[in-house]
Protein backbone atom coordinates (compact mmCIF):
# COMPACT_ATOMS: atom_id res chain seq x y z
CA UNK A 1 0.00 0.00 0.00
CA UNK A 2 2.80 2.42 0.89
CA UNK A 3 4.61 1.60 -2.35
CA UNK A 4 1.54 2.45 -4.41
CA UNK A 5 0.84 5.62 -2.45
CA UNK A 6 4.33 7.05 -2.90
CA UNK A 7 4.38 6.04 -6.56
CA UNK A 8 1.04 7.75 -7.18
CA UNK A 9 2.22 10.92 -5.41
CA UNK A 10 5.48 11.12 -7.37
CA UNK A 11 4.05 10.37 -10.81
CA UNK A 12 0.94 12.42 -10.06
CA UNK A 13 3.17 15.42 -9.38
CA UNK A 14 4.91 15.27 -12.77
CA UNK A 15 2.29 17.35 -14.69
CA UNK A 16 2.53 20.04 -12.02
CA UNK A 17 6.34 19.93 -12.17
CA UNK A 18 6.31 20.43 -15.95
CA UNK A 19 4.00 23.40 -15.39
CA UNK A 20 6.09 24.95 -12.60
CA UNK A 21 9.68 24.05 -11.63
CA UNK A 22 8.96 25.27 -8.08
CA UNK A 23 6.81 22.18 -7.56
CA UNK A 24 9.73 20.06 -8.71
CA UNK A 25 12.10 21.73 -6.27
CA UNK A 26 9.66 21.12 -3.40
CA UNK A 27 9.14 17.50 -4.43
CA UNK A 28 12.89 16.98 -4.55
CA UNK A 29 13.29 18.38 -1.02
CA UNK A 30 10.58 16.02 0.19
CA UNK A 31 12.18 12.98 -1.45
CA UNK A 32 15.74 13.84 -0.37
CA UNK A 33 14.97 14.85 3.24
CA UNK A 34 12.21 12.44 4.22
CA UNK A 35 13.19 9.58 1.92
CA UNK A 36 9.60 8.24 1.99
CA UNK A 37 10.57 5.22 -0.09
CA UNK A 38 12.71 4.05 2.86
CA UNK A 39 9.45 3.44 4.73
CA UNK A 40 8.32 0.85 2.19
CA UNK A 41 9.15 -2.84 1.79
CA UNK A 42 8.29 -3.45 -1.86
CA UNK A 43 9.44 -2.19 -5.24
CA UNK A 44 9.34 1.47 -4.14
CA UNK A 45 12.22 1.01 -1.70
CA UNK A 46 14.72 0.90 -4.57
CA UNK A 47 12.83 2.82 -7.24
CA UNK A 48 14.71 5.94 -8.52
CA UNK A 49 12.10 8.50 -7.49
CA UNK A 50 14.71 11.18 -6.81
CA UNK A 51 16.21 10.79 -10.28
CA UNK A 52 12.79 11.10 -11.94
CA UNK A 53 11.95 14.22 -9.95
CA UNK A 54 15.33 15.78 -10.66
CA UNK A 55 15.13 15.18 -14.42
CA UNK A 56 11.57 16.50 -14.60
CA UNK A 57 12.52 19.59 -12.58
CA UNK A 58 15.55 20.41 -14.73
CA UNK A 59 13.48 19.91 -17.88
CA UNK A 60 10.78 22.23 -16.54
CA UNK A 61 13.38 24.78 -15.46
CA UNK A 62 14.87 24.93 -18.96
CA UNK A 63 11.50 25.34 -20.69
CA UNK A 64 9.79 27.55 -18.12
CA UNK A 65 9.21 31.23 -18.86
CA UNK A 66 9.08 32.09 -15.17
CA UNK A 67 12.00 34.09 -13.70
CA UNK A 68 14.82 31.70 -12.86
CA UNK A 69 17.88 33.81 -12.23
CA UNK A 70 20.28 32.80 -9.46
CA UNK A 71 20.66 35.51 -6.78
CA UNK A 72 24.32 36.49 -6.80
CA UNK A 73 25.00 37.31 -3.18
CA UNK A 74 28.08 36.75 -1.05
CA UNK A 75 26.46 33.55 0.23
CA UNK A 76 25.75 32.05 -3.19
CA UNK A 77 29.18 33.05 -4.53
CA UNK A 78 30.85 31.35 -1.55
CA UNK A 79 28.69 28.25 -2.07
CA UNK A 80 29.77 28.17 -5.71
CA UNK A 81 33.36 28.47 -4.53
CA UNK A 82 32.93 25.52 -2.16
CA UNK A 83 31.44 23.37 -4.93
CA UNK A 84 34.27 24.28 -7.31
CA UNK A 85 36.86 23.47 -4.66
CA UNK A 86 35.26 20.06 -4.02
CA UNK A 87 35.48 19.35 -7.75
CA UNK A 88 39.10 20.49 -7.76
CA UNK A 89 40.06 18.16 -4.91
CA UNK A 90 38.33 15.14 -6.45
CA UNK A 91 41.19 14.16 -8.84
CA UNK A 92 43.58 14.19 -5.87
CA UNK A 93 41.47 11.76 -3.81
CA UNK A 94 43.33 8.96 -2.05
CA UNK A 95 40.59 6.49 -2.97
CA UNK A 96 39.15 7.80 -6.20
CA UNK A 97 36.53 5.11 -6.88
CA UNK A 98 34.82 5.37 -3.50
CA UNK A 99 35.27 9.16 -3.50
CA UNK A 100 33.46 9.39 -6.83
CA UNK A 101 30.40 7.66 -5.37
CA UNK A 102 30.20 10.19 -2.52
CA UNK A 103 30.96 13.07 -4.90
CA UNK A 104 27.90 12.16 -7.00
CA UNK A 105 25.65 12.31 -3.92
CA UNK A 106 27.04 15.67 -2.79
CA UNK A 107 26.83 17.25 -6.24
CA UNK A 108 23.16 16.24 -6.59
CA UNK A 109 22.43 18.06 -3.34
CA UNK A 110 24.36 21.12 -4.44
CA UNK A 111 22.70 21.16 -7.87
CA UNK A 112 19.21 21.05 -6.39
CA UNK A 113 20.17 23.70 -3.85
CA UNK A 114 21.00 25.99 -6.76
CA UNK A 115 17.71 25.03 -8.39
CA UNK A 116 15.86 26.05 -5.22
CA UNK A 117 17.73 29.35 -5.25
CA UNK A 118 16.78 29.93 -8.88
CA UNK A 119 13.06 29.09 -8.78
CA UNK A 120 11.86 30.10 -5.30
CA UNK A 121 10.90 33.76 -5.56
CA UNK A 122 8.00 34.52 -3.22
CA UNK A 123 7.03 34.34 0.41
CA UNK A 124 4.50 31.66 -0.50
CA UNK A 125 7.24 29.48 -2.00
CA UNK A 126 9.44 30.01 1.06
CA UNK A 127 6.54 29.08 3.33
CA UNK A 128 5.85 25.92 1.36
CA UNK A 129 9.51 24.89 1.54
CA UNK A 130 9.52 25.29 5.33
CA UNK A 131 6.38 23.17 5.52
CA UNK A 132 8.03 20.44 3.42
CA UNK A 133 11.05 20.38 5.75
CA UNK A 134 8.85 20.29 8.85
CA UNK A 135 6.61 17.51 7.54
CA UNK A 136 9.56 15.47 6.25
CA UNK A 137 11.52 15.49 9.52
CA UNK A 138 8.51 15.94 11.78
CA UNK A 139 7.26 12.53 10.68
CA UNK A 140 10.31 10.91 12.29
CA UNK A 141 10.10 13.24 15.28
CA UNK A 142 6.52 12.30 16.10
CA UNK A 143 7.17 8.64 15.38
CA UNK A 144 10.36 8.62 17.47
CA UNK A 145 8.75 10.54 20.31
CA UNK A 146 5.88 8.07 20.56
CA UNK A 147 8.38 5.19 20.42
CA UNK A 148 10.36 6.74 23.29
CA UNK A 149 7.20 7.16 25.37
CA UNK A 150 6.09 3.59 24.77
CA UNK A 151 9.51 2.09 25.50
CA UNK A 152 10.23 4.36 28.45
CA UNK A 153 13.40 5.50 26.70
CA UNK A 154 14.99 2.07 27.01
CA UNK A 155 15.79 1.79 23.31
CA UNK A 156 17.50 4.20 20.92
CA UNK A 157 15.70 6.13 18.22
CA UNK A 158 17.19 5.55 14.76
CA UNK A 159 16.66 7.26 11.43
CA UNK A 160 15.64 5.77 8.06
CA UNK A 161 18.13 3.27 6.62
CA UNK A 162 20.39 4.31 3.78
CA UNK A 163 20.07 8.06 4.37
CA UNK A 164 22.15 10.87 5.85
CA UNK A 165 20.13 10.62 9.05
CA UNK A 166 20.18 6.84 9.48
CA UNK A 167 22.27 6.89 12.66
CA UNK A 168 20.96 7.79 16.09
CA UNK A 169 23.24 10.84 16.29
CA UNK A 170 22.29 12.05 12.84
CA UNK A 171 18.51 11.75 13.28
CA UNK A 172 18.82 13.47 16.66
CA UNK A 173 20.56 16.51 15.16
CA UNK A 174 18.05 16.67 12.30
CA UNK A 175 15.16 16.71 14.79
CA UNK A 176 16.89 19.37 16.87
CA UNK A 177 17.18 21.55 13.76
CA UNK A 178 13.53 21.19 12.74
CA UNK A 179 12.05 22.24 16.10
CA UNK A 180 12.66 26.00 15.51
CA UNK A 181 11.05 25.69 12.07
CA UNK A 182 8.00 24.15 13.72
CA UNK A 183 7.92 27.09 16.09
CA UNK A 184 7.96 29.53 13.15
CA UNK A 185 4.97 27.79 11.55
CA UNK A 186 3.25 27.68 14.93
CA UNK A 187 3.60 31.47 15.24
CA UNK A 188 2.42 31.99 11.66
CA UNK A 189 -0.60 29.64 11.80
CA UNK A 190 -4.06 31.00 12.57
CA UNK A 191 -5.84 27.66 12.83
CA UNK A 192 -5.78 26.49 16.45
CA UNK A 193 -5.66 22.80 15.50
CA UNK A 194 -2.58 23.36 13.35
CA UNK A 195 -0.97 25.27 16.23
CA UNK A 196 -1.74 22.44 18.64
CA UNK A 197 -0.41 19.83 16.21
CA UNK A 198 2.82 21.78 15.78
CA UNK A 199 3.23 22.22 19.54
CA UNK A 200 2.77 18.48 20.06
CA UNK A 201 5.24 17.78 17.25
CA UNK A 202 7.83 20.01 18.90
CA UNK A 203 7.54 18.18 22.21
CA UNK A 204 7.63 14.73 20.60
CA UNK A 205 10.59 15.69 18.38
CA UNK A 206 12.52 16.93 21.41
CA UNK A 207 11.71 13.68 23.23
CA UNK A 208 12.78 11.63 20.19
CA UNK A 209 16.07 13.53 20.08
CA UNK A 210 16.69 12.68 23.73
CA UNK A 211 15.65 9.09 23.03
CA UNK A 212 18.44 8.78 20.48
CA UNK A 213 21.00 8.85 23.33
CA UNK A 214 23.02 11.36 21.29
CA UNK A 215 25.28 13.48 23.47
CA UNK A 216 25.99 15.86 20.61
CA UNK A 217 22.28 16.49 20.13
CA UNK A 218 21.87 17.04 23.88
CA UNK A 219 24.57 19.73 23.80
CA UNK A 220 22.94 21.22 20.69
CA UNK A 221 19.54 21.43 22.43
CA UNK A 222 21.17 23.20 25.37
CA UNK A 223 22.91 25.70 23.06
CA UNK A 224 19.70 26.38 21.12
CA UNK A 225 17.70 26.89 24.32
CA UNK A 226 20.23 29.43 25.62
CA UNK A 227 20.27 31.26 22.29
CA UNK A 228 16.47 31.42 22.10
CA UNK A 229 16.28 32.70 25.67
CA UNK A 230 18.80 35.48 24.98
CA UNK A 231 16.90 36.55 21.87
CA UNK A 232 13.43 36.29 23.39
CA UNK A 233 11.55 39.49 24.16
CA UNK A 234 9.73 37.68 26.98
CA UNK A 235 12.64 36.16 28.85
CA UNK A 236 10.65 35.47 32.02
CA UNK A 237 7.90 33.58 30.18
CA UNK A 238 10.33 31.67 27.98
CA UNK A 239 12.53 30.82 30.95
CA UNK A 240 9.53 29.55 32.89
CA UNK A 241 8.50 27.42 29.89
CA UNK A 242 11.96 25.81 29.75
CA UNK A 243 12.11 25.27 33.50
CA UNK A 244 8.71 23.58 33.48
CA UNK A 245 9.19 21.51 30.30
CA UNK A 246 12.80 20.27 30.35
CA UNK A 247 12.60 18.46 33.72
CA UNK A 248 9.48 16.60 32.55
CA UNK A 249 11.23 15.41 29.38
CA UNK A 250 14.33 14.37 31.32
CA UNK A 251 12.23 12.56 33.92
CA UNK A 252 10.87 10.31 31.18
CA UNK A 253 14.35 8.98 30.39
CA UNK A 254 15.75 5.92 32.23
CA UNK A 255 18.87 5.77 34.38
CA UNK A 256 20.98 4.36 31.55
CA UNK A 257 20.29 7.55 29.59
CA UNK A 258 21.61 9.65 32.48
CA UNK A 259 24.72 7.49 32.64
CA UNK A 260 25.28 8.08 28.93
CA UNK A 261 24.97 11.86 29.25
CA UNK A 262 27.27 11.95 32.27
CA UNK A 263 30.14 10.69 30.12
CA UNK A 264 30.29 14.17 28.58
CA UNK A 265 32.19 15.29 31.70
CA UNK A 266 34.47 12.24 31.67
CA UNK A 267 35.47 11.97 28.01
CA UNK A 268 39.01 10.78 28.88
CA UNK A 269 37.67 7.40 29.96
CA UNK A 270 35.04 7.12 27.22
CA UNK A 271 36.13 4.94 24.33
CA UNK A 272 33.81 6.59 21.81
CA UNK A 273 35.07 10.08 22.65
CA UNK A 274 38.69 8.96 22.43
CA UNK A 275 37.98 7.40 19.05
CA UNK A 276 36.62 10.71 17.79
CA UNK A 277 39.66 12.60 19.00
CA UNK A 278 41.85 10.01 17.27
CA UNK A 279 39.92 10.61 14.01
CA UNK A 280 40.30 14.38 14.43
CA UNK A 281 44.08 14.00 14.71
CA UNK A 282 44.04 11.83 11.60
CA UNK A 283 42.21 14.43 9.49
CA UNK A 284 44.46 17.22 10.79
CA UNK A 285 47.65 15.33 10.01
CA UNK A 286 46.34 14.35 6.58
CA UNK A 287 45.47 17.95 5.74
CA UNK A 288 48.94 19.09 6.79
CA UNK A 289 50.47 16.47 4.51
CA UNK A 290 48.21 16.99 1.48
CA UNK A 291 47.20 20.47 0.32
CA UNK A 292 44.00 19.23 -1.37
CA UNK A 293 43.15 16.83 1.45
CA UNK A 294 42.34 13.18 0.95
CA UNK A 295 39.10 13.55 -0.97
CA UNK A 296 35.75 12.01 -0.10
CA UNK A 297 35.55 8.78 1.94
CA UNK A 298 38.98 8.58 3.61
CA UNK A 299 38.09 6.72 6.79
CA UNK A 300 39.72 3.33 6.44
CA UNK A 301 42.63 1.33 7.78
CA UNK A 302 45.29 2.68 5.41
CA UNK A 303 44.74 6.37 6.21
CA UNK A 304 44.57 5.72 9.96
CA UNK A 305 47.75 3.65 9.74
CA UNK A 306 49.61 6.64 8.29
CA UNK A 307 48.06 9.66 10.00
CA UNK A 308 46.30 8.60 13.23
CA UNK A 309 47.94 8.42 16.68
CA UNK A 310 46.14 5.10 17.23
CA UNK A 311 46.07 3.33 13.84
CA UNK A 312 43.75 0.55 15.04
CA UNK A 313 40.96 2.84 16.32
CA UNK A 314 39.15 3.60 13.05
CA UNK A 315 36.23 6.05 13.20
CA UNK A 316 34.43 8.48 10.95
CA UNK A 317 35.43 12.11 11.49
CA UNK A 318 32.47 12.73 13.82
CA UNK A 319 32.80 16.45 13.16
CA UNK A 320 31.68 18.55 10.21
CA UNK A 321 34.77 20.70 10.53
CA UNK A 322 37.32 17.90 10.71
CA UNK A 323 35.45 16.05 7.97
CA UNK A 324 35.88 18.99 5.58
CA UNK A 325 39.46 19.51 6.76
CA UNK A 326 40.48 15.92 6.09
CA UNK A 327 38.64 15.61 2.78
CA UNK A 328 39.31 19.04 1.25
CA UNK A 329 42.24 20.53 3.16
CA UNK A 330 42.62 23.82 4.97
CA UNK A 331 41.35 25.81 1.98
CA UNK A 332 38.15 23.76 1.89
CA UNK A 333 37.66 24.25 5.63
CA UNK A 334 38.18 28.01 5.24
CA UNK A 335 35.53 28.24 2.52
CA UNK A 336 33.13 26.09 4.56
CA UNK A 337 33.52 28.27 7.66
CA UNK A 338 33.14 31.43 5.57
CA UNK A 339 29.91 30.05 4.14
CA UNK A 340 28.55 29.53 7.64
CA UNK A 341 29.54 33.03 8.74
CA UNK A 342 27.99 34.70 5.69
CA UNK A 343 24.79 32.69 6.07
CA UNK A 344 24.54 33.84 9.68
CA UNK A 345 25.15 37.45 8.65
CA UNK A 346 22.44 37.15 5.99
CA UNK A 347 19.92 36.20 8.68
CA UNK A 348 21.11 39.03 10.91
CA UNK A 349 20.70 41.54 8.06
CA UNK A 350 17.10 40.43 7.54
CA UNK A 351 16.30 40.75 11.24
CA UNK A 352 17.91 44.19 11.51
CA UNK A 353 16.24 45.66 8.42
CA UNK A 354 12.73 44.33 9.05
CA UNK A 355 12.48 45.45 12.66
CA UNK A 356 10.37 48.55 11.91
CA UNK A 357 8.11 47.00 9.28
CA UNK A 358 5.14 45.00 10.52
CA UNK A 359 4.48 43.55 7.05
CA UNK A 360 7.93 41.93 7.11
CA UNK A 361 7.65 40.55 10.62
CA UNK A 362 7.41 37.04 9.16
CA UNK A 363 10.88 37.39 7.61
CA UNK A 364 12.42 38.42 10.93
CA UNK A 365 10.78 35.52 12.79
CA UNK A 366 11.82 33.02 10.13
CA UNK A 367 15.41 34.27 10.07
CA UNK A 368 15.65 34.14 13.86
CA UNK A 369 14.36 30.56 13.90
CA UNK A 370 16.78 29.54 11.14
CA UNK A 371 19.57 31.08 13.21
CA UNK A 372 18.44 28.87 16.08
CA UNK A 373 18.52 25.82 13.79
CA UNK A 374 21.99 26.78 12.63
CA UNK A 375 23.16 27.09 16.24
CA UNK A 376 22.08 23.49 16.72
CA UNK A 377 23.85 22.46 13.53
CA UNK A 378 27.05 24.38 14.32
CA UNK A 379 27.27 22.99 17.86
CA UNK A 380 25.97 19.48 17.23
CA UNK A 381 27.91 19.29 13.98
CA UNK A 382 31.15 19.65 15.92
CA UNK A 383 30.59 16.03 17.03
CA UNK A 384 28.89 14.55 13.95
CA UNK A 385 29.87 13.95 10.31
CA UNK A 386 27.06 15.82 8.56
CA UNK A 387 28.95 18.33 6.46
CA UNK A 388 26.92 17.37 3.37
CA UNK A 389 23.54 17.04 5.07
CA UNK A 390 21.10 18.75 2.72
CA UNK A 391 18.84 20.55 5.22
CA UNK A 392 21.37 23.28 6.17
CA UNK A 393 21.87 24.05 2.48
CA UNK A 394 18.11 24.38 1.95
CA UNK A 395 17.95 26.74 4.94
CA UNK A 396 20.77 28.72 3.33
CA UNK A 397 18.65 28.99 0.19
CA UNK A 398 15.65 30.14 2.25
CA UNK A 399 17.68 32.93 3.84
CA UNK A 400 19.11 34.14 0.52
CA UNK A 401 15.67 34.19 -1.14
CA UNK A 402 14.10 35.86 1.92
CA UNK A 403 16.71 38.59 1.82
CA UNK A 404 15.97 39.23 -1.86
CA UNK A 405 12.25 39.45 -1.04
CA UNK A 406 12.93 41.85 1.83
CA UNK A 407 15.20 44.05 -0.29
CA UNK A 408 12.52 44.29 -2.97
CA UNK A 409 9.81 45.05 -0.40
CA UNK A 410 11.89 47.79 1.21
CA UNK A 411 12.60 49.31 -2.20
CA UNK A 412 8.87 49.29 -3.01
CA UNK A 413 8.11 50.98 0.31
CA UNK A 414 10.71 53.69 -0.30
CA UNK A 415 9.54 54.46 -3.84
CA UNK A 416 6.16 56.10 -2.95
CA UNK A 417 7.84 58.13 -0.23
CA UNK A 418 10.36 59.56 -2.67
CA UNK A 419 7.65 60.27 -5.24
CA UNK A 420 5.45 62.05 -2.69
CA UNK A 421 8.37 64.15 -1.47
CA UNK A 422 9.25 65.16 -5.02
CA UNK A 423 5.63 66.05 -5.82
CA UNK A 424 5.32 68.17 -2.70
CA UNK A 425 8.55 70.00 -3.46
CA UNK A 426 7.56 70.88 -7.06
CA UNK A 427 4.95 73.64 -6.28
CA UNK A 428 7.24 75.21 -3.74
CA UNK A 429 10.08 75.28 -6.21
CA UNK A 430 7.85 76.84 -8.89
CA UNK A 431 6.65 79.52 -6.48
CA UNK A 432 10.22 80.33 -5.50
CA UNK A 433 11.22 80.63 -9.14
CA UNK A 434 8.31 82.94 -9.90
CA UNK A 435 9.12 85.14 -6.92
CA UNK A 436 12.70 85.44 -8.08
CA UNK A 437 11.67 87.17 -11.40
CA UNK A 438 10.93 90.93 -10.94
CA UNK A 439 7.93 92.30 -12.90
CA UNK A 440 7.20 96.02 -13.37
CA UNK A 441 3.42 96.04 -13.28
CA UNK A 442 3.21 99.68 -14.33
CA UNK A 443 4.80 98.99 -17.67
CA UNK A 444 2.44 96.18 -18.58
CA UNK A 445 -0.36 96.97 -20.98
CA UNK A 446 -3.65 96.31 -19.17
CA UNK A 447 -5.17 95.12 -22.47
CA UNK A 448 -6.05 91.41 -22.40
CA UNK A 449 -3.56 89.00 -23.78
CA UNK A 450 -4.61 87.01 -26.81
CA UNK A 451 -3.46 83.49 -25.86
CA UNK A 452 -4.89 82.07 -29.05
CA UNK A 453 -2.35 84.00 -31.05
CA UNK A 454 0.44 81.72 -29.95
CA UNK A 455 3.77 82.25 -28.28
CA UNK A 456 5.12 85.23 -30.38
CA UNK A 457 1.89 87.25 -29.91
CA UNK A 458 2.03 86.81 -26.18
CA UNK A 459 5.63 87.96 -26.10
CA UNK A 460 4.81 91.03 -28.26
CA UNK A 461 1.99 92.08 -25.97
CA UNK A 462 4.10 91.69 -22.84
CA UNK A 463 6.91 93.73 -24.42
CA UNK A 464 4.70 96.79 -25.05
CA UNK A 465 5.21 99.83 -22.87
Image: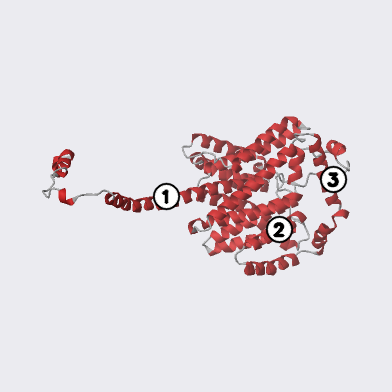
Q: Is residue 55 left or right of residue 266?
A: left
Disc 2 crowd, CA 10 A, few/some/many (<14, 14-19, 20+): some
Mark 1 or 2 closer to N-term? 2
**Foreground of the two, 407 or 186:** 407
**Residue at image mark 1:** 415
Secondary structure of residue under mark 3? helix
Q: Residue furthest top?
A: 91
Mark 3 or 2 closer to N-term? 2
Q: Please, is residue 129 above or below residue 265 in the view?
A: above
- Mark number for residue 278? 3
- Separation of marks 3 and 1 at Cα, in angstroms: 59 Å
Secondary structure of residue under mark 1? helix
Disc 1 crowd, CA 10 A, few/some/many (<14, 14-19, 20+): few
Q: How far across and down, in percent of the image, does residue 173 sit?
A: 70, 53
- Separation of marks 1 and 2 at Cα, in angstroms: 42 Å
Q: Please, is residue 399 above or below residue 81 in the view?
A: below
Badge 1 vs badge 2, beta-carbon distance below 8 Å: no
**Foreground of the two, 209 or 451:** 451
Q: Residue at x 71, y 39 (%)?
A: 332
Q: Residue at x 59, y 51 (%)?
A: 347
Looking at the rendered image, the disc whose residue lies closer to the viewer, 3 or 1, is 1
- Mark number for residue 59? none
**Residue at image mark 2:** 223
Disc 3 crowd, CA 10 A, few/some/many (<14, 14-19, 20+): many
Q: How far across and down, in percent of the image, does residue 328 sit?
A: 73, 37
Quadrant holding the C terminus: top left
Amino acid sequence: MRDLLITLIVFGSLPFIFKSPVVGALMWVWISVMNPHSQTWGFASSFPFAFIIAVATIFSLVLSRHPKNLPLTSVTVTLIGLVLWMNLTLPFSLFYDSALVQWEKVMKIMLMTFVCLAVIKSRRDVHRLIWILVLSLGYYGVKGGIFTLRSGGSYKVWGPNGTFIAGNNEIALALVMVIPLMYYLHQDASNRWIRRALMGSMLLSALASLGSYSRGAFVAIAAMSIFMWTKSRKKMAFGFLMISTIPILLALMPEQWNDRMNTINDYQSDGSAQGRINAWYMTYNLARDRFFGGGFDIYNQSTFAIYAPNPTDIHAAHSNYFQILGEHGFVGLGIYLLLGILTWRCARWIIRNTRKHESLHWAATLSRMIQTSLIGFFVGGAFLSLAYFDVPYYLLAVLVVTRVIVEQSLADMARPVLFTAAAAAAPAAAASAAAAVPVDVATVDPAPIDTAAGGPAVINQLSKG
